[in-house]
Each structure stands twice: as structure tokens, then as C-alpha cells.
Image (cartoon, rainbow, N blue to C red):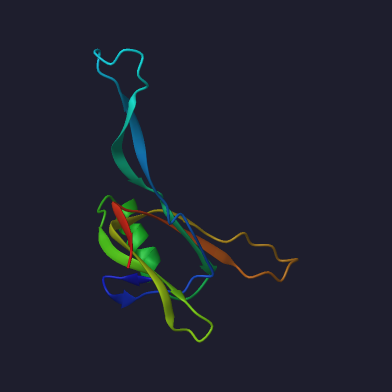
């Protein structure tokens, strides 16, 4: 993931790269028995949910903490899909994003699983570049 053009973190899982448009039905009173027209309404973008093994880097946590403290810091960023040789294959850019949720790992001393953290980013636009 890149934030303001700087690579910030690598994630093992990404969800929420979605967009949809609400449909508004419209029919004029002079349309006898006609089915309504389907017009495009508001565009909406899903929240981006990123998961990774817990790391020592606190940059993303500090960004979330600012939102918790009431100082939401909006940033532009990108989710970059890498191929097997770790070269960029696809790139989704989001605008005016900020972290709305952070979830820490489930800790179990009897298991040897990776500690996974999750970060949810809300944003106002998504495009495939």
C-alpha cells in the first residue's frame, strides 16, 4: 500500500475494492403504462479492508490514532497488486482516505499462529490505473 506516493506497508489480504451506483426509478405522469426509466444516482465506494501480520512499524497506527483523537487526516493512496516477481501488476488509487477502524490480533499462547492486524480505510473515490 502506498500513502501519498510512499510505500507504507505490505498486506497479505485486501478486500473492499468495490464501487456501485444507486439506481433511481423515474416515470413521467404522461407515460401511459410505461415502465420507469432507470437513472444513475449516487456513486458509492466500499471500505478497503487490509490484513497483515503484525509488525513493528507504527505509522499506520499513528494515522489511526489521529482519527481517534478527532483530527482526521485524509490522504490519497494506492493498493498495488504485485506479481510473482514482486513487480506491480495492477494499481487501484483511492482519494481522501482515512482509517476508520483498526483491529488488533487475537492472541493465544497455545497456538503458533501469526498475529494478524486489520485496517479499514474509508475513502471518497477509487479508480483502477
Quarter of the rendering containing residue 102: bottom left
Question: Where 25 sits versus 124, above or below?
Answer: above
Instruction: Report x, y in % for residue 16.
Output: 46, 54
Between residue 75 and residue 95, name the one nearer to us.
95
Between residue 116 and residue 84, name the one nearer to us.
84
Question: Where 125 sits versus 77, above or below?
Answer: above
Can you say which quadrant of the picture contains the C terminus?
bottom left
Q: Tell me the residue at 43%/76% (across/down).
A: 89
Q: Tell me the residue at 29%/54% (across/down).
A: 125
Left or right of 71: which side holds 120?
right
Quarter of the rendering containing residue 116: bottom right
Between residue 60 and residue 80, name the one nearer to us.
80
Left or right of 32: which side holds 106?
right
Q: Tell me the residue at 69%/62% (across/down).
A: 108
Can you say which quadrant of the picture contains the N terminus?
bottom left
Question: Where 91 sits versus 39, above or below?
Answer: below
Quarter of the rendering containing residue 32: top left
Q: Tell me the residue at 34%/44% (across/down).
A: 44
Instruction: Report x, y in % for residue 85.
Output: 50, 87
Q: Residue furthest bottom?
A: 85
Q: How many marks?
A: 0
Amino acid at each position: 500500500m502506498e500513502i501519498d506516493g510512499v510505500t507504507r506497508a505490505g498486506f497479505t489480504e485486501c478486500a473492499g475494492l468495490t464501487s456501485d451506483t444507486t439506481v433511481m426509478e423515474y416515470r413521467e405522469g404522461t407515460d401511459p403504462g410505461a415502465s420507469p426509466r432507470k437513472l444513475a444516482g449516487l456513486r458509492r465506494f466500499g471500505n478497503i479492508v487490509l490484513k497483515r501480520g503484525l509488525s513493528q512499524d507504527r505509522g499506520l497506527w499513528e494515522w489511526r490514532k489521529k482519527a481517534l483523537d478527532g483530527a482526521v487526516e485524509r490522504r490519497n493512496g494506492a493498493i498495488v497488486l504485485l506479481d510473482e516477481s514482486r513487480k506491480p501488476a495492477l494499481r487501484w488509487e483511492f482519494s481522501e482516505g482515512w482509517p476508520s477502524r483498526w483491529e488488533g490480533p487475537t492472541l493465544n499462547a497455545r497456538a503458533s499462529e501469526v498475529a494478524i492486524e486489520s485496517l479499514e480505510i474509508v475513502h471518497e473515490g477509487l479508480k483502477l490505473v
